[in-house]
């Protein structure tokens, strides 16, 4: 049986309950030679058509789109936004945000202030050693933080794909708060640092001004073909497969004509007959059994299709190919 497909679960459903909960926390920490102060760390939803007019911040603001679509204008350049993208509005970058007219757009936002510290400036974590006697791990952290912050200052003002899953860090931090986990401060600190590192890595992974888009006809054809090959033994219909690839039956029929020169039904018959020919040659099962196991409603209908397509009956085909293999 093939039930109706259900909507894809939203990974950040938990954050919808109290999306701004972490904003109430006063989080400051030192990373290398930098002090980081969390201003906002939340999930929000732009209702369809909602506009946030041109504005700017004196701090860094990281934006991630976990669901929906819309657009952003960075400086004077407009960009389309869609699920899975991120963009950074660095200090004093004027920007404008807008959700799609018909579809809401969710956003995960991290707004932080980053300040260069003198070596002896806090915040210093409990148990940390003074700078002159810092160990290798401390020196590595200083170098890592310095490299990351310098990269942030140079990132281009354009969206890219969140290919290193910085968004997941928001949920990690929120879940720690929601479940009252021990070490909440540490989880939030590590989440923020990971967001910074994964974001810079996303921009450094090569040009992504235009995220490659799929040839949707080819993509849906491949999905449909794979589904047919996996389920050819079931009573498949054009409507069932169209639902699986989320297009109309008419569109799916057109796609099969474009790619195969034939109809959807002809393609399924081809797949089924390929399996049936193999079983006729190698199996001792009856024609009735082979017909039912390969999606045909009866042996009589298999006989009709087989002769129309291959010019022979299933039994004659079996006899001929058994003689060839003996």
Image (cartoon, rainbow, N blue to C red):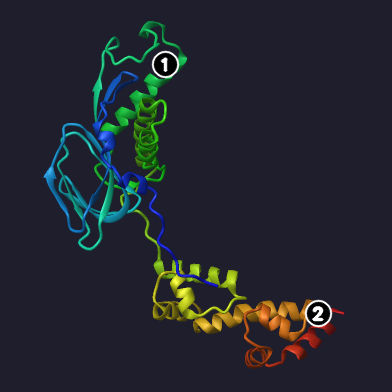
Q: Residue 162 at what x, y percent from top left?
A: 37, 45
**Residue that carries the numbered disc 1 in the rendered image:** 138
Up/down of 133 relative to 179, above or below: above
Residue 50 occupies which quadrant of the picture? bottom left
Residue drawn 40% across the image and 81% down it: 250
Residue drawn 14% across the image and 39% down it: 56
Element carrying mark 2 = loop
Residue drawn 60% across the image and 81% down it: 270
1 or 2: mark nearer the eye: 2
Q: Residue 116 at what x, y percent from top left?
A: 25, 20
- Quadrant of the frame with the N terminus: bottom right
Up/down of 232 relative to 62, above or below: below
Q: Residue furthest front?
A: 180
Q: Earlier in the sequence, mark 1 or mark 2?
A: 1
Q: Residue 218 at what x, y percent from top left?
A: 45, 69
The numbered mark at residue 88 is none
Up/down of 41 relative to 5, above or below: above
Q: Dot 1: within a 10 Å radius of its alpha carbon, few (fewer than 14), some, or many (20 or more) residues?
A: some
């Amino acid at each position: 049986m093939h039930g109706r497909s259900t909507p894809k679960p939203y990974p950040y459903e938990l954050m919808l309950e109290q999306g701004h909960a972490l904003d109430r926390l006063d989080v400051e920490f030192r990373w290398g030679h930098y002090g980081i102060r969390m201003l906002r760390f939340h999930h929000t939803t732009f209702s369809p058509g909602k506009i946030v007019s041109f504005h700017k911040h004196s701090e860094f603001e990281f934006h991630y789109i976990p669901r929906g679509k819309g657009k952003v204008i960075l400086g004077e350049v407009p960009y389309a936004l869609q699920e899975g993208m991120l963009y950074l509005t660095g200090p004093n970058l004027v920007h404008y945000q807008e959700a799609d007219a018909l579809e809401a757009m969710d956003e995960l936002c991290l707004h932080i202030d980053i300040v260069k510290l003198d070596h002896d400036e806090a915040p210093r974590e409990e148990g940390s050693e003074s700078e002159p006697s810092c160990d290798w791990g401390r020196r590595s952290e200083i170098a890592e933080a310095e490299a990351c912050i310098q990269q942030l200052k140079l990132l281009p003002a354009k969206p890219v794909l969140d290919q290193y899953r910085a968004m997941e860090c928001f949920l990690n931090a929120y879940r720690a708060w929601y479940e009252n986990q021990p070490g909440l401060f540490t989880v939030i600190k590590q989440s923020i640092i990971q967001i910074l590192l994964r974001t810079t890595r996303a921009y450094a992974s090569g040009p992504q001004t235009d995220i490659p888009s799929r040839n949707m006809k080819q993509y849906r054809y491949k999905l449909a073909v794979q589904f047919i090959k996996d389920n050819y033994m079931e009573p498949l219909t054009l409507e069932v497969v169209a639902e699986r690839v989320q297009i109309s039956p008419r569109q799916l029929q057109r796609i099969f004509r474009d790619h195969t020169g034939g109809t959807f039904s002809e393609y399924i018959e081809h797949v089924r007959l390929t399996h049936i020919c193999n079983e006729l040659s190698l199996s001792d099962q009856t024609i009735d059994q082979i017909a039912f196991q390969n999606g045909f409603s009866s042996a009589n209908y298999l006989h009709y299709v087989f002769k129309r397509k291959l010019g022979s009956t299933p039994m004659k085909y079996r006899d001929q190919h058994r003689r060839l293999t003996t």
